[in-house]
Image (cartoon, helix red, strand yellow):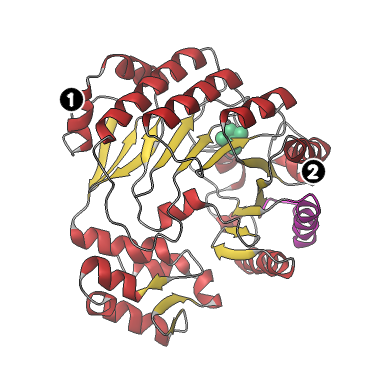
Amino acid sequence: MARHIYVHNPFCARKCPYCDFYSVADTSESNAFYKAALREAKLLGEIMKDSSGKDHINDRDDRDTVYFGGGTPSVPDSRLICDLLSGILDAFSISSDAEITIEVNPSSVTDEKLSDYKLAGFNRISAGVQSLDDEVLKRLGRLHDSKDAVDAIKRITAAGFNNVSADLITGVPGGTLDGIKKDINTFYSLGVKHISTYSLMLEEGTVFFERYGKTIEDLMPPEKEREMYHGTRDCLRSLGYETYEISNSALPGYRSIHNSAYWNSCEYLAVGAGSHGYLGNVRYGHEDDIHAYIEEMNSVSEEDYRAFLEGNDRLSSLYVEEILSEEDKMREVPFLRLRTDEGILLDEFKNVFGVEFEDVFGQAVKTNIEKGLLERKERTLRLTRSGLDLANKVIEDFL
Ligand code: SF4
């Protein structure tokens, strides 16, 4: 059974005005944080030694994955990152064909860091470009301009990384569909294999929430936002990218195995303050607090950590989000799988849960097929093009 590990790096060079991920712009604790993260990885490795992982549905690719996200993992000293990766590879006996990703930003990724990442075993880079339009980048408060971004992608490929992903944000005031298409074409010509496109969201507590309003309608009319969404996907497909998830597209063979594991209800382990994991029946999280994390990881016993993972809330910097019943697990299937182009595979659902999907969710299926939001093709159920526009509403019907 494949193992999936997410590491949350909580450091950034500066806080972007739209971002609500947990990160701080002060790296003075980075040494202590990575020492604590290494101890957490070793503890988890010991605890998981005899576990083969739980059954999950629809595992297309059984490779292990490790994903360093954040925050900006290219901000701290690369030795800290590489030492932690080395500890994780050892602690979990990660297989040599694993997908190992690190997120980087154009303003902080240097040639030396790229060379260190390569040597340490990273084989996939996700670059936080967000736009190649300087006006849009300025509005987003990014530290790089379009030239830095293009230069970073060229340096990433020159360092030997073939599997490169880039992020784009759509719906930014002043941004246009033509601008997004131009960016996608540039990515394609630079050899970018995977593109994530996220609509700008106004999250409570961010500078943008105060500046622009509370909902997406405060940024642009919903029809324009949808036109941009579908125009972006049409452009991606015209270049050969498979739009395999609501926000993610990839050239054939370059889908994110790590992210696919989330949508396939696989278990994943979490390392670092602000990270979230899923093991057995338990979805859990680490508090957004570097100090509490460092203190706890330096002192917690294996026994207490193990008890926590079994659902006993005994730690102060980790918390149980939810203990899932069998019904909860069934409800998660439409929630996670309707995001993907494959949709819900009815045979796999039956294999895992022992019941037909429609015996459990018949009414929601019927209503949404009648509305033209869901379609059935043989033994799969997926969103139609109009269903994609109302994905949250469709999913609500299954909860
Ligand atoms: S660099 Fe990324 S994680 Fe850091 S503040 Fe900006 S958007 Fe958030």
Residue 183's place in the image compared with 112, above or below, is: below
Compared with 81, 363 (above or below) is below
- Dot 1 falls on a residue whose secondary structure is helix
Instruction: Find residue 344 and report its horizontal and vertical position in percent.
Output: 39, 71
Q: In this rendering, would 249 be left or right of 133?
A: left
Ligand 1 occupies quarter = top right
Residue shown at the point (69%, 35%) measured from the top left:
141
- Please tell me whether residue 175 belongs to the stretch shown in magenta: yes
Q: In the rendered image, which quarter contains the C terminus?
A: bottom left
Count of numbered marks: 2
Q: Which residue is mark 2?
A: 135
Label 2 sits on a secondary structure element that is helix
Q: Position of residue 324 (x, y in %)?
A: 22, 52
In this image, 74 relative to 182: left or right?
Answer: left
Closer to us: 175 or 43: 43
- Extent of the magenta region: 171-191
How far is the residue under mark 1 from the one under mark 2?
A: 53 Å
160 sits left or right of 2 in the view: right
Which label belongs to residue 303? Answer: 1
Depth check, mark 1 against mark 2: the one in front is 1
